[in-house]
Amino acid sequence: MTTSHANRKPDLSVTVAGIEFKNPVIAASGTFGYGIEFEDVVHLDKIGGFVVKGLSKEPMAGNPPPRLYETAAGMLNAIGLQNIGAQAFLDEKLPKLREIKNIVVLANVFGYTREDYERTIQILNEGEGIAAYELNVSCPNTAQGGIQFGSDPRLLDEVVATARHSTQRPLIVKLSPNVTSIAQMAYVAQEAGADAISLVNTFVAMAIDAETRRPRIANVTAGLSGPAIKPIALRMVYDAAKAVKIPVIGMGGIASAVDIIEFMLAGASAIQIGTASYWDPCATEKIVEELQEWCVDHKIEKLASVTGGLLTD
Ligand SMILES: Cc1cc2nc3c(=O)[nH]c(=O)nc-3n(C[C@H](O)[C@H](O)[C@H](O)COP(=O)(O)O)c2cc1C
């Protein structure tokens, strides 16, 4: 008996930076621990992949509380990049992840100087089972008066070039949305050697308690994420995708299969899900199932064909 067109399972696979993902749904850094903590909640082999918490060369304690605050349709966080450090990740987390078959682990890397990024990548290069690095450039450069690496084209160029020279592994540069021209930053990252870009990181924002006259977050300012940022993130993915030839990984407020399709139409080859996992820890896996159904309902045989398909006339 021949399989009818309608019964065929849609092909959700995508290839980004030479890495094959079984579907485009990747859990975003800082919202999925080191992956292993989600093992009992999500079938890790059902999602496209996950990005671990940002890693630095030394362990970091992060900011004092309160560090999280829920806003209308979003969330503020100022965790302060708390993490166990690159070496402890290799020793304590990666061996457990290696025991799980058929998963894609991406390591998010940050630092406060170019040398920090270089050193962290050198440590991680020794670990087996990391598919790629995602460079978080939304950090202040302490050697350059605290300007964010990702907010200055020259600093961005330098840090991406440094990372490029430090590894053979695929390099994804995660852009900061706190810039005037995201297209320019996307292009700079590409020219400095990125294999792909991901965007957006959180928007600098704040919330105030009118009763106490105090900030809601101890750090005063914090990063805004969740559905509140989705339309801006979508516009930035669209602008960035037009400016580069390398693949784009889109994120910012994605909480459903339809959101994913919108980001892919804007030019994303894959997407990440962050804040939605705070509201429902199973969100990533559920959205993969929803995506499968959406493709069947809309007769999409190969999901990758949706990328860049926005109609504007
Ligand atoms: C609590 C929290 C921690 C985060 N930590 C990191 C991090 O360590 N490194 C990083 O590159 N992005 C970090 N992010 C940003 C997310 O990965 C993502 O870019 C952003 O939240 C937008 O996606 P979303 O709206 O789906 O959450 C963090 C976000 C949240 C909410």
Image (cartoon, helix red, strand yellow):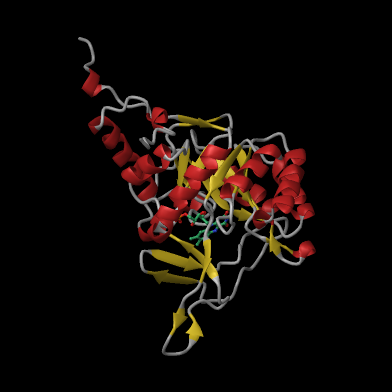
Q: Farthest residue in the top direction? A: 1
Q: Find residue 290 and report its horizontal and vertical position in percent.
A: 29, 41
Tell me if residue 224 comes above or below residue 304 in the rendering: below
Quadrant occupied by the N terminus: top left
**Image check: 95 left or right of 207?**
right
**Image check: 227 left or right of 55?**
left
Q: Residue at x 36, y 40 (%)?
A: 261
Q: Residue at x 74, y 51 (%)?
A: 154
Q: Which quadrant holds residue 299?
A: top left
**Image check: 132 left or right of 160?**
left
Quadrant occupied by the C terminus: top left
Q: Find residue 167 and report its horizontal and vertical position in percent.
A: 73, 38
In-front residue for pair 154/5: 154
Q: Residue at x 22, y 11 (%)?
A: 2
Q: Find residue 127 and report its horizontal and vertical position in percent.
A: 68, 41
In-front residue for pair 120/45: 120
Q: Which quadrant holds residue 17?
A: top right
Can residue 110 be seen in the rendering of this structure? Answer: no
In-front residue for pair 191/273: 191
Tell me if residue 211 comes above or below residue 220 in the rendering: below
Q: Residue at x 42, y 34 (%)?
A: 23
